[in-house]
Amino acid sequence: MDIYEEVVRLRNLGQKCALATIVEVRGSIPSYESAKLLVREDGSMTGTIGGGCVEAEVWNAAREVIQTEKPKHLTFNLGQDAAYDNGLICGGQLDVFVEPVLPVPHAFIFGAGHISKSLSKVATLAGFASVVIDNRDTFANRERFPEAADVHAAEYEEVFPKLGINETSYVIIVTRGHRDDMRVLQLAIATPARYIAMIGSKRKVLNVIRELEKQGMARSAFERIHAPMGLDIGAISPEEIAISVTAEMIAVRRNAGSNWRSLSMSVFAGEGERAVLSK
Protein backbone atom coordinates (compact mmCIF):
# COMPACT_ATOMS: atom_id res chain seq x y z
CA MET A 1 0.00 0.00 0.00
CA ASP A 2 1.34 3.42 -0.96
CA ILE A 3 1.56 5.60 2.15
CA TYR A 4 0.82 8.83 0.32
CA GLU A 5 -2.30 7.41 -1.31
CA GLU A 6 -3.43 6.15 2.10
CA VAL A 7 -2.91 9.60 3.62
CA VAL A 8 -5.11 11.13 0.92
CA ARG A 9 -7.75 8.43 1.42
CA LEU A 10 -7.88 8.98 5.18
CA ARG A 11 -8.09 12.75 4.79
CA ASN A 12 -10.96 12.39 2.34
CA LEU A 13 -12.74 10.20 4.89
CA GLY A 14 -12.26 12.87 7.54
CA GLN A 15 -9.95 10.67 9.63
CA LYS A 16 -6.80 11.71 11.48
CA CYS A 17 -3.51 9.80 11.33
CA ALA A 18 0.15 10.29 12.21
CA LEU A 19 3.14 10.00 9.90
CA ALA A 20 6.51 9.02 11.37
CA THR A 21 9.63 9.67 9.28
CA ILE A 22 13.27 8.90 9.97
CA VAL A 23 14.74 12.37 9.44
CA GLU A 24 18.37 11.79 10.42
CA VAL A 25 20.67 8.78 10.72
CA ARG A 26 24.07 8.56 12.44
CA GLY A 27 25.88 5.27 12.00
CA SER A 28 24.29 1.91 11.17
CA ILE A 29 20.57 1.28 11.65
CA PRO A 30 18.22 -1.48 10.38
CA SER A 31 16.35 0.97 8.15
CA TYR A 32 17.17 4.12 6.18
CA GLU A 33 16.71 7.87 6.26
CA SER A 34 13.24 8.95 5.00
CA ALA A 35 11.65 5.58 5.89
CA LYS A 36 8.03 6.12 6.95
CA LEU A 37 5.40 4.58 9.19
CA LEU A 38 1.75 5.65 9.03
CA VAL A 39 -0.43 5.07 12.10
CA ARG A 40 -4.22 5.35 11.79
CA GLU A 41 -6.75 6.39 14.43
CA ASP A 42 -7.61 2.76 15.13
CA GLY A 43 -3.94 1.94 15.78
CA SER A 44 -3.37 0.00 12.55
CA MET A 45 -0.20 0.74 10.59
CA THR A 46 1.26 0.74 7.13
CA GLY A 47 4.93 1.13 6.22
CA THR A 48 7.85 0.57 8.58
CA ILE A 49 10.84 2.32 10.09
CA GLY A 50 12.66 -0.90 10.91
CA GLY A 51 10.52 -2.78 13.41
CA GLY A 52 11.43 -3.82 16.93
CA CYS A 53 11.30 -1.66 20.03
CA VAL A 54 11.95 1.57 18.16
CA GLU A 55 8.86 1.06 16.04
CA ALA A 56 6.82 0.16 19.13
CA GLU A 57 7.85 3.40 20.84
CA VAL A 58 7.13 5.40 17.71
CA TRP A 59 3.69 3.77 17.51
CA ASN A 60 2.97 4.92 21.06
CA ALA A 61 4.15 8.42 20.22
CA ALA A 62 2.01 8.44 17.07
CA ARG A 63 -1.10 7.60 19.09
CA GLU A 64 -0.34 10.55 21.34
CA VAL A 65 0.24 12.82 18.34
CA ILE A 66 -3.13 11.84 16.87
CA GLN A 67 -4.79 12.70 20.18
CA THR A 68 -3.00 16.01 20.82
CA GLU A 69 -2.57 17.01 17.16
CA LYS A 70 0.95 18.18 18.04
CA PRO A 71 4.15 16.76 16.47
CA LYS A 72 6.95 15.01 18.37
CA HIS A 73 10.65 14.57 17.71
CA LEU A 74 12.24 11.35 19.01
CA THR A 75 15.88 10.28 19.21
CA PHE A 76 17.01 6.66 19.56
CA ASN A 77 20.45 5.26 20.37
CA LEU A 78 20.38 1.64 19.23
CA GLY A 79 23.39 0.61 21.25
CA GLN A 80 22.51 2.14 24.60
CA ASP A 81 20.10 -0.44 25.99
CA ALA A 82 19.85 -4.21 26.00
CA ALA A 83 16.18 -3.78 25.18
CA TYR A 84 17.24 -3.43 21.58
CA ASP A 85 18.75 -6.92 21.41
CA ASN A 86 16.14 -8.15 18.93
CA GLY A 87 18.21 -7.30 15.92
CA LEU A 88 18.42 -3.56 16.47
CA ILE A 89 21.81 -3.23 18.13
CA CYS A 90 23.54 -1.64 15.19
CA GLY A 91 25.42 0.99 17.12
CA GLY A 92 23.76 3.84 15.27
CA GLN A 93 21.39 6.63 16.17
CA LEU A 94 18.28 7.89 14.45
CA ASP A 95 15.87 10.78 14.80
CA VAL A 96 12.21 10.26 14.04
CA PHE A 97 9.73 13.07 13.41
CA VAL A 98 6.11 12.18 14.10
CA GLU A 99 3.57 14.61 12.67
CA PRO A 100 -0.22 14.69 12.80
CA VAL A 101 -2.02 14.48 9.46
CA LEU A 102 -5.39 16.11 9.82
CA PRO A 103 -8.31 16.17 7.39
CA VAL A 104 -9.56 19.45 6.02
CA PRO A 105 -12.10 20.55 8.65
CA HIS A 106 -15.62 20.87 7.30
CA ALA A 107 -17.91 23.67 8.43
CA PHE A 108 -21.51 22.50 8.07
CA ILE A 109 -23.62 25.65 7.91
CA PHE A 110 -27.32 25.03 8.43
CA GLY A 111 -29.28 27.90 6.96
CA ALA A 112 -28.46 29.88 3.86
CA GLY A 113 -29.38 33.42 4.88
CA HIS A 114 -27.30 36.58 4.93
CA ILE A 115 -25.08 35.52 7.84
CA SER A 116 -24.39 32.15 6.22
CA LYS A 117 -23.41 33.85 2.98
CA SER A 118 -20.65 35.79 4.76
CA LEU A 119 -19.73 32.88 7.03
CA SER A 120 -19.16 30.49 4.13
CA LYS A 121 -16.74 32.95 2.52
CA VAL A 122 -14.78 33.74 5.69
CA ALA A 123 -14.61 30.10 6.83
CA THR A 124 -13.36 29.05 3.40
CA LEU A 125 -10.61 31.67 3.52
CA ALA A 126 -9.62 30.35 6.96
CA GLY A 127 -9.14 26.82 5.63
CA PHE A 128 -12.50 25.22 6.33
CA ALA A 129 -14.46 23.42 3.63
CA SER A 130 -17.90 24.96 3.96
CA VAL A 131 -21.03 22.92 3.31
CA VAL A 132 -24.31 24.85 3.22
CA ILE A 133 -27.66 23.22 3.93
CA ASP A 134 -31.10 24.82 3.66
CA ASN A 135 -34.55 23.55 2.76
CA ARG A 136 -35.08 26.46 0.33
CA ASP A 137 -33.47 26.09 -3.08
CA THR A 138 -33.86 29.82 -3.70
CA PHE A 139 -31.29 30.31 -0.93
CA ALA A 140 -29.18 27.13 -1.04
CA ASN A 141 -27.66 27.30 -4.51
CA ARG A 142 -24.33 27.75 -6.25
CA GLU A 143 -25.06 31.32 -7.28
CA ARG A 144 -25.16 32.41 -3.64
CA PHE A 145 -22.37 30.13 -2.43
CA PRO A 146 -19.82 29.69 -5.23
CA GLU A 147 -16.95 29.09 -2.79
CA ALA A 148 -18.69 26.31 -0.83
CA ALA A 149 -17.42 22.74 -1.08
CA ASP A 150 -21.03 21.59 -1.32
CA VAL A 151 -24.55 22.99 -1.19
CA HIS A 152 -27.66 21.00 -0.27
CA ALA A 153 -31.23 22.17 -0.86
CA ALA A 154 -33.37 19.66 1.05
CA GLU A 155 -34.97 19.03 4.41
CA TYR A 156 -32.46 18.91 7.24
CA GLU A 157 -33.47 15.46 8.47
CA GLU A 158 -33.08 14.11 4.93
CA VAL A 159 -29.61 15.51 4.34
CA PHE A 160 -28.09 15.13 7.81
CA PRO A 161 -27.31 11.36 7.71
CA LYS A 162 -25.47 11.82 4.42
CA LEU A 163 -23.07 14.50 5.66
CA GLY A 164 -20.68 12.22 7.56
CA ILE A 165 -20.24 14.56 10.53
CA ASN A 166 -17.39 13.34 12.74
CA GLU A 167 -14.83 14.51 15.33
CA THR A 168 -13.25 16.95 12.89
CA SER A 169 -16.55 18.60 11.90
CA TYR A 170 -17.86 22.06 12.79
CA VAL A 171 -21.62 22.60 12.90
CA ILE A 172 -23.06 26.11 12.75
CA ILE A 173 -26.83 26.55 13.12
CA VAL A 174 -28.18 29.73 11.55
CA THR A 175 -31.54 28.73 10.12
CA ARG A 176 -34.50 31.05 9.56
CA GLY A 177 -36.28 30.35 12.85
CA HIS A 178 -36.31 28.80 16.31
CA ARG A 179 -38.16 25.71 15.20
CA ASP A 180 -35.65 24.87 12.48
CA ASP A 181 -32.78 25.64 14.84
CA MET A 182 -34.21 23.16 17.29
CA ARG A 183 -34.57 20.48 14.60
CA VAL A 184 -30.92 20.81 13.60
CA LEU A 185 -29.62 21.10 17.15
CA GLN A 186 -31.37 17.88 18.09
CA LEU A 187 -29.54 16.14 15.25
CA ALA A 188 -26.20 17.85 15.89
CA ILE A 189 -25.79 17.04 19.57
CA ALA A 190 -26.10 13.34 18.76
CA THR A 191 -22.89 13.58 16.69
CA PRO A 192 -19.25 13.73 17.85
CA ALA A 193 -18.78 17.10 16.09
CA ARG A 194 -15.85 19.07 17.43
CA TYR A 195 -17.78 22.33 17.44
CA ILE A 196 -21.50 23.05 17.59
CA ALA A 197 -22.72 26.64 17.57
CA MET A 198 -26.14 28.23 17.35
CA ILE A 199 -27.11 31.81 16.65
CA GLY A 200 -29.33 33.72 19.03
CA SER A 201 -29.53 35.38 22.41
CA LYS A 202 -29.15 33.51 25.69
CA ARG A 203 -32.92 33.64 26.11
CA LYS A 204 -33.51 32.07 22.70
CA VAL A 205 -30.95 29.35 23.36
CA LEU A 206 -32.56 28.57 26.71
CA ASN A 207 -35.98 28.33 25.12
CA VAL A 208 -34.75 25.93 22.45
CA ILE A 209 -32.96 23.76 24.97
CA ARG A 210 -35.93 23.77 27.33
CA GLU A 211 -38.11 22.42 24.52
CA LEU A 212 -35.62 19.65 23.77
CA GLU A 213 -35.44 18.76 27.44
CA LYS A 214 -39.19 18.29 27.42
CA GLN A 215 -38.59 15.68 24.72
CA GLY A 216 -36.32 13.76 27.07
CA MET A 217 -32.86 15.05 26.16
CA ALA A 218 -30.45 15.28 29.08
CA ARG A 219 -29.19 18.70 30.14
CA SER A 220 -25.59 17.50 29.97
CA ALA A 221 -25.98 16.91 26.24
CA PHE A 222 -26.05 20.67 25.65
CA GLU A 223 -22.79 21.56 27.39
CA ARG A 224 -20.86 21.46 24.10
CA ILE A 225 -22.96 24.19 22.49
CA HIS A 226 -21.29 27.51 21.72
CA ALA A 227 -24.08 30.00 22.18
CA PRO A 228 -24.28 32.86 21.70
CA MET A 229 -21.94 31.79 18.93
CA GLY A 230 -18.64 33.46 18.12
CA LEU A 231 -16.03 35.33 20.08
CA ASP A 232 -17.28 38.46 21.80
CA ILE A 233 -15.89 41.22 19.59
CA GLY A 234 -19.05 43.33 19.55
CA ALA A 235 -20.03 42.01 16.11
CA ILE A 236 -23.19 43.44 14.57
CA SER A 237 -23.10 43.09 10.79
CA PRO A 238 -23.24 39.70 9.00
CA GLU A 239 -19.61 40.11 7.99
CA GLU A 240 -18.51 40.86 11.55
CA ILE A 241 -20.52 37.93 12.90
CA ALA A 242 -18.88 35.67 10.31
CA ILE A 243 -15.43 36.80 11.46
CA SER A 244 -16.40 36.28 15.10
CA VAL A 245 -17.67 32.75 14.51
CA THR A 246 -14.74 31.76 12.31
CA ALA A 247 -12.33 33.09 14.93
CA GLU A 248 -13.99 30.86 17.52
CA MET A 249 -13.78 27.88 15.16
CA ILE A 250 -10.05 28.56 14.70
CA ALA A 251 -9.57 28.74 18.48
CA VAL A 252 -11.24 25.34 18.85
CA ARG A 253 -9.26 23.92 15.92
CA ARG A 254 -5.96 25.09 17.41
CA ASN A 255 -6.89 24.01 20.95
CA ALA A 256 -6.60 27.59 22.21
CA GLY A 257 -8.68 26.67 25.24
CA SER A 258 -8.41 29.98 27.08
CA ASN A 259 -9.67 31.94 24.10
CA TRP A 260 -12.99 30.29 23.39
CA ARG A 261 -16.07 29.68 25.43
CA SER A 262 -18.86 27.15 25.55
CA LEU A 263 -22.30 27.20 27.02
CA SER A 264 -23.20 25.15 30.06
CA MET A 265 -26.73 25.15 31.37
CA SER A 266 -27.49 25.34 35.07
CA VAL A 267 -30.69 25.49 37.09
CA PHE A 268 -30.58 27.06 40.53
CA ALA A 269 -33.31 26.46 43.07
CA GLY A 270 -35.62 29.43 43.24
CA GLU A 271 -33.76 31.31 40.52
CA GLY A 272 -35.00 29.59 37.35
CA GLU A 273 -32.80 28.82 34.39
CA ARG A 274 -29.83 30.85 33.31
CA ALA A 275 -26.80 30.43 31.10
CA VAL A 276 -23.35 30.27 32.53
CA LEU A 277 -20.55 31.13 30.12
CA SER A 278 -17.35 29.41 31.14
CA LYS A 279 -14.05 30.72 29.90
Image: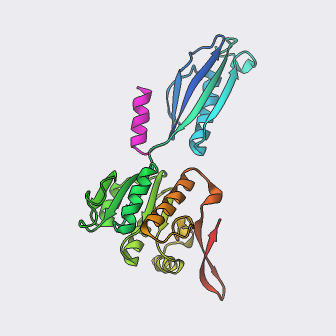
Left or right: 274, with 119 as reference point: right
Instruction: Give the percent coordinates (x, y) of residue 17.
Output: 51, 38
> In the picture shown, does residue 8 fall above or below 134?
above
In the image, residue 42 lies in the stretch drawn in magenta: no
Instruction: Give the percent coordinates (x, y) of residue 135.
Output: 28, 68
In front of the other: 233 or 223? 233
Q: Label the magenta part by its dominant secondary structure.
A: helix
> In the picture shown, does residue 76 fall above or below 59?
above
Question: In the picture, residue 13 is in which quadrant?
Answer: top left
The structure residue drawn at horizontal position 65% and vertical position 58%, both measured from the top left corner, is: 258
Image quadrant where one finds the N terminus: top left
Question: In the picture, residue 114 is in which quadrant?
Answer: bottom left
> Residue reaching furthest left?
138
Q: How many numbered discs?
A: 0
In front of the other: 27 or 210? 27
Left or right: 256, with 185 as reference point: right
Image quadrant where one finds the C terminus: bottom right
Instruction: Give the percent coordinates (x, y) of residue 112.
Output: 33, 66
The structure residue drawn at horizontal position 40% and vertical position 77%, both measured from the top left corner, is: 178
Question: What's drawn in magenta, residue-wise?
Answer: 1-15
The structure residue drawn at horizontal position 57% and vertical position 55%, both measured from the top left corner, is: 251
What colour scheme does the image use? rainbow
> In the picture shown, does residue 23 fall above or below 106?
above
Left or right: 188, with 258 as reference point: left
Instruction: Give the percent coordinates (x, y) of residue 245.
Output: 49, 62
In the image, residue 13 lies in the stretch drawn in magenta: yes
The structure residue drawn at horizontal position 64% and vertical position 29%, both measured from the top left corner, is: 57
